[in-house]
Amino acid sequence: MTTVTTATTTKQPSLVGGACIIASVCVGAGMLGLPSAGAGAWTVWSVLAIALTMAVMTVSGWLLLEAFKLYDLNVSFNTVTSDLLGEKVNAFNNLTVYFVGGILLYAYTTSFGLILQGSLGLESKTASVLFVFIASSVVWHSTRAVDRISVVLICTMLLSFVFGVFGLTVHVDFSLLMDVANQQGEYAKYAMALLPIALTSFGYHHSVASMRAYYGEERKAKYAILGGTSIALFLYVIWLVSIFGHLSRDSFGPVIEQGGNVDVLLGVLGTVVASDKVSQAINIFSVSAILSSFIGVGLGVFDYIADLFHFDNRSKSGRTKTWAATFMPPLVLSLLFPFGFILAIGYAGAAATVWTCIIPALLVLKARQRKGAEQGFVVAGGKLIPYAVLLFGVATAVFHFLTMLDILPVFKG
């Protein structure tokens, strides 16, 4: 075990900058799954579910910071897990990281293919192939290319989100938002099925080590994480209010029947939005969100695969091998088994509980047994907090599989 190094710079980065980094990691195409996944729970219970998830996921990131404090600033998630929990646990953790990345690429590929099918008139599978080859070429080219494209996409997302959502929020129908027409409706029992999708929407934990190194300490990284997850929660609530304030609860039936696919949701939303410009802004936001998430997740999986198989990332042949291992399996699965968007995101959420909740809790419990663990950054609450995070992660994964087995109630519109 190595000792902690200290930052050498006299002026640290701003908390606003770090919070924006965390928020940009959280907010992506997973946001597009929240309305369909929350249709059963509707407004109040959906907001409560994502608020609870935000709180737990924020604390779980803090638990990682506490475990990381015993190591150098350049330490990785992989290194700490291997040292504290052993190689077998680390291998399983890495497998879930790859699975989540792969299933997200699969979901984005399928969704974008369906959107292109509607806008360009292409067959969805052909559109998916074109999308993967064009978008993944940015990742194959270089990280710098991803950086430049991401800046453009984020700016596009912000502008289209502000214009589109503002156009929706000023015309929210309160009776729809509160589901006034359905006085005997049941909502709370559907909130459990929303948790895996909500958890995926706050998955920033692979960036915790980067935040710690960014600030050179744990405390500022803690507040940056809190700021980032708070921004994400704020945007999610606005988005849900805008959608639920325009679509009746029953109108989600066709969307859910099609697996919550984004193209179906956008099509239904387009029928009730009076302004064509607002509708176009929402569509642009959705396309930008999926493309941005695909490239961002793709880069992470790309680097993971290159490190795992020791491919040469400096040569064209090495990068081509990495590209094939990264993007071809999700594309093939998308062509053979075009599951719904919500189903795929749900599986990703169930697997993500391992490295966003379970592993952070186990890491900090183990780290607190080390000498010097009581000094420096410590998450308040004693053992209660890590055990609560662990329980939330296990419960979320269980809820997902119980929903898949039709043991938990599933809203079908």
Image (tube, grey):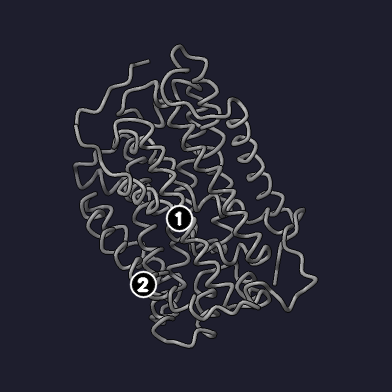
> Disc 2 marks which residue?
160
Residue 352 vs 382, above or below: the answer is: below
Q: Nearer the viewer, residue 230 or 302?
A: 230
Quadrant in the picture for the C terminus: bottom right
Quarter of the figure with residue 289: bottom left
User: Looking at the picture, how far across and down is residue 218, in whole percent?
Assistant: 37, 31
Disc 1 residue type?
Answer: Ala
Residue plotted at (42% across, 81% down): 278
Q: Secondary structure at mark 1?
A: helix
Residue ID for mark 1: 232
Instruction: Give the quadrant of the N terminus.
Output: top left
Q: Which mark is residue 38?
A: none
Residue at 49 percent across and 20 percent down: it is 367
Q: Residue at x 47, y 47 (%)?
A: 203
Instruction: Give coordinates of residue 231: x percent, y percent.
Output: 43, 55
> Residue 29: horizontal and vertical position, in percent?
45, 61
Most foreground residue, 329 or 36: 36
Q: CA distance from mark 1 to mark 2?
A: 16 Å
Tag 1: Cα neighbours inside 10 Å, few (<14), some, or many (≥20)?
Answer: many
State whether residue 203 is above or below residue 364: below
